[in-house]
Amino acid sequence: MAKIHGGRLLARALKAEGVDTLFTLTGGHIVPILDGCVEEGIRVVDVRHEETAGHAAEAYSRLTGRLGVAAVTAGPGVTNTVTAVMNAHHSHTPMLVIGGRHPVRQEHTGGLQEMNHPPLFASITKWAATAWETVRLADYIAIAARHAFSGRGGPVFLDIPLDVQFGMVDESTPLPTGYRVTEPQGADSTAVEYVAHLLATSDRPVIFAGGGVRGDGVKGLLTVAEALNAPVYTNGGARGALPHGHPLLGNRTRSRAFAEADVVLALGVDWDFRTGYGQKLAGDAAVIQVDEEERRLGWNRPAQHAVAANPGRFLVQLADHAATFAADGARPWTEDIQAAEAEKLVVAEAEAAAPSELVAPQRFGREVGAFFGTDAIVAVDGGDIVATTARWLQTSTPGYLLEPGPAGTLGTGPGFALAAKVVHPEKTVGIVFGDGAFGFNGFEYDTFVRLGLPIIGVLGNDGVWSNIKTFHRMFYPDRLVASDLGRRPYHAVVEALGGHGELVTRPDDLQPALARAAASGKPALVDVHIDESFRPSTNYSG
């Protein structure tokens, strides 16, 4: 009977799981895995730093709903993925990092890059293990996927000794089937009916949508929101679930709406620092919290009604009851919120239009949002400039705004954009950088050039760690340290790597420069000198 090596058996199991792309930085401890992917027709996309491979695997999962996979070599190759795994852990993204490992026969002998990797990932994964037998490699992939897609989802880690990868098994070795949940869990009918009743009797309802609002759940959200005539706010993966410009979609009035609402329908969201730990909601507001991760229900903010279900599936169920809570005509409170939203937009437009020598951050955000429009996939990578720009982006499809999530990780942009261009080569894919963030993984422009991926980056360059400098000034204004970078010519780095680079120092030059970057057909970076600005921040002080 014909034989295959363990790397090919592993690749077959990945392919059966729906994986068609593997992100990697090559290394001696994973050569059989890469060979197996070639044999099985899985695309191998190689990068310049393992962290990027991990970030790309996370974005692949967000964009496809399938398991994102990165394979990296032993020791430093594995440790370089820790930040990416941590980010996926905080964002609840299913993904798998496969690490090479020293051969079993070299255990405890001081072999090259010998390391026991799984304990390193214990606190930031749903599961981490070593595969000790070649014949069980497909089983290990099944176990990994089952853990990765459990609950909200999250990262998993598997390392495989080199001699286990080289081991030979029968070509007919069976692959596991039916090993994980494929249908999202809904709520029982009584829970759905009760929520419909609470919404029907509310005067000032708000919908706050986060992770899990995908697929049919997007239609459900639209049906529920319009029937209820309630303001809708989104974060994370739900950005775009209501299209840009929808009259119920809030952007700049969330704090006010939370403070005044009498009922809040919270769908797959966390009451963490981004929401004031739930304390921005009115004290007497009734919170309906829907989450498939039961341990998140009632976290930091009591839930008057907690529902353990997939938020998207729950919205589909709730939409069937829309007639029971449909608002009769106008809802005055919603109209007030919409008027406040319009007023805040006018103020932001005025700030963007105000004369300035360099490009004002609001002008930067408005121009970038207009350039990318509603159909582009945009990765955002930075601090203050990203917070400003995100309000102007016109995201109209869930998952098309690729933000790092609550971990606040810098350096995610290149990996996120790489995965987006691989998954959707026909789409415009962009990155919004802060100048600090560019320094983490900006050299991946070499990857973009090498693979012929015309990703368009635009960088807000104020020459400082703006968010941190603001925080530092609040406490030690006379002893600022380690907060200034200077304005470096980052566009020249991209030019030197074979891409299109351009510097912008005047506001009126920004749109033409973005147009030239798109027309170049190359990986591009528009380096924009923006005004240094400061705003009070409490994200660090709690």
Image (spheres, rainbow, N blue to C red):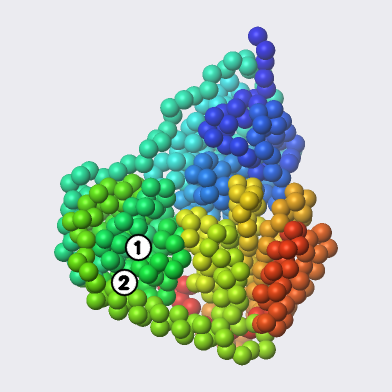
Q: Residue at x 51, y 82 (%)?
A: 349
Q: Secondary structure at mark 2?
A: helix
Which badge, 2 or 1, is on the more N-terminal residue? 1
Residue 111 drawn at (x, y percent): 73, 35
Name the disc covering residue 258, or none. 2
Quadrant containing the N terminus in the rendered view: top right
Residue 272 drawn at (x, y percent): 39, 64
Cα separation between marks 2 and 1: 9 Å
Q: Residue at x 17, y 53 (%)?
A: 194
Task: Using the rendered image of the protein, determine whether residue 82 is visible from the camera's viewpoint.
Answer: no
Q: Nearer the viewer, residue 158 or 442?
A: 442
Q: Secondary structure at mark 1?
A: strand
At label 2, counting other C-alpha atoms closer than 10 Å, the crowd grade (few under 14, some 14-19, many 20 or more) is many
- Vertical arrangement, residue 446 with respect to residue 280, above or below: above
Q: Quadrant of residue 38?
A: top right
Identify the amino acid type marked 2. Phe
Q: Residue at x 65, y 28 (%)?
A: 40
Identify the amino acid type marked 1. Phe
Q: Which residue is mark 1?
A: 208
At label 1, counting other C-alpha atoms closer than 10 Å, the crowd grade (few under 14, some 14-19, many 20 or more) is many
Lateral position of residue 383 relative to residue 237, left or right? right
Marks 2 and 1: CB-CB under 8 Å? yes
